[in-house]
Image (tube, rainbow, N blue to C red):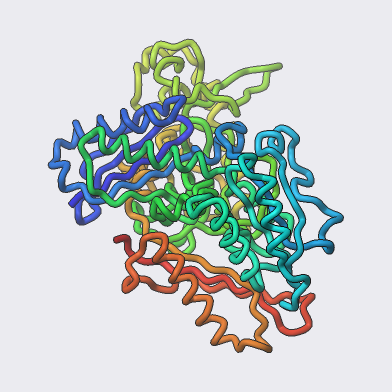
Amino acid sequence: MYKIGIDVGGTNTDAILLDHNSQLVYSVKSPTSLDIKTGIEQSLQQLLQGANIDKTKITHAMLGTTQCTNAIVERKKLARVGVIRLGYPATASVLPYTAWPSDLIEKLSGNYAIAHGGYEYDGQLLSALDQEEITKLLEEWRDQVESIAIVGVFSSIKNDQELQVRDWIQAIYGEDFPVSCSSLIGSVGLIERENATILNAALCKVIETTTKGFIQALQAEGIFNVEVYLCQNDGTLMSIDYAKQFPILTIACGPTNSIRGASYLSQIQNTMVLDVGGTTSDIGVLQDGFPRESSVAVEVGDIRTNFRMPDIISVGLGGGSIVRVKDNKITVGPDSVGYKISEEALVFGGSTMTTTDIAVRLGLAEVGDPNLVAHIDEAFAKAVQEEISSLLEQAIDKMKTSSEDVSLVLVGGGSIIVPEKIQGVSTIAKSEYGGVANAIGASIAQISGQYEQIYIYSKEPREESLKDAQHKAVKQAVLAGALADTIELVEVEETPLAYHPENATRLKVKVVGKMV
């Protein structure tokens, strides 16, 4: 039995093969192509040729991809979205798409309606649904929208209205029509939750193309009858069908794959992780083997959202970062030669000085031809390395929760540029397979389920609330592809709501289980 793990980065697409004991059999690293799909196909082809195994024994294939992130940032391949907010007239003063970039609104069509519905903060009815109102709206939008986002006021307390409207939409447009419900995606906060739901709805075409392309790439190499999963941004996996419902959960999955891979390779459950790629360096924190989650609202493509995101700091520093001297000052990055490093870096016969050239000049790495960088002054190279250290030290300090030195696990194909000592870091752990930690993280991950809701403990006791939330989280994990009898509770987070008079608490539960 074998597993394939593929992670698509900005510079390289990494592919690995694990055996039934989760031991690395073979790995490859190839440049990420402009269309991404070609890079995946090339990595797969190289992996299978090099490993030379019986393809019929491959049982699982996992993909970590940047395509959903790229679609939002580049404003490409997005679906036309209709937004139904259940909250008339209470929320009419702040309309959907408020504070959105105009070019993104134009791409998504900008169709929205504020309809009757919604709840008060204590779960009391704000206004009842009007089926005739929704039906009329859907007839107006027919052929104008490709996906719909439903957002109910305080649906984080009660979401039955959102689910009812979803049923009405699919009865009129068909069961396969993409519908996103905010209560299943975002957290407390109407506008941020609405924004996340709109983005999720906009990604339905991207995720369809991505999953179909991955399956076709596998089949082109003679790999059939495998369980296929996509990576989530909490360091776990989800099935193809689940990913189609929640494509937004793939955003920022690359860094979390690396963090999970770093934990696996180092056998450390709690530490800081530095993942250095060709273009950027990502810094995250491992807590009990999983990436630490961000506790603040996160912007995605200039849109403020509040859905689950990892706590990651990205720095414009990688193995392909360009080194310059301007006005007697050394600068490193943030621009990079990226996937063209094998053509443009000095050690490979190119004409652009990169951080990799500096590492080779100082004897930190053995890549390319060191004779091609022998002309670089050693004092200058050391000064560049000091600038690299400074960039990393500042980023690491931002991730610390105390002034004490931290332990660090170093991974990523660009990790050769990192100095042996960094101020504020007590120890640095490395692995010979650190260059493909992201793909390893993708392939060893479990399936997760998460559920978040506001519970009023004075009406529903805490133990009953916990039991209900865990039951719903388990249900999500099973939908994502987990085996029910392997699921276990890994996280419970309770946040009392100070503004609520009846002991209301935002309860978040996370469970994980083994894949089918």
In depth, the one of 240 and 249 nearer the eye is 240
Q: Residue at x 36, y 39 (%)?
A: 214
Q: Residue at x 67, y 67 (%)?
A: 155
Residue 390 seen in this snapshot? no
Q: Residue at x 45, y 30 (%)?
A: 11
Residue 195 position, x and y percent, is 68, 50
Is 218 on the left or on the right of 437, as rendered? left
- Above or below — where is 200 with respect to 120? above
- Above or below — where is 486 with respect to 430? below
Residue 173 seen in this snapshot? yes
Quadrant location of residue 515? Answer: bottom left
Quadrant location of residue 42? Answer: top left
Quadrant location of residue 505? Answer: bottom right
Residue 339 position, x and y percent, is 44, 24
Is 190 on the left or on the right of 237, as rendered? right
Is 241 on the left or on the right of 136, as rendered? left
Residue 405 position, x and y percent, is 55, 55
In depth, the one of 20 and 54 nearer the eye is 54
Q: Residue at x 55, y 33 (%)?
A: 77
Total count of labels: 0
- Above or below — where is 426 with respect to 320? below
In depth, the one of 95 and 237 nearer the eye is 95
Residue 81 position, x and y percent, is 64, 44
* Quadrant containing the C terminus in the rendered view: bottom left
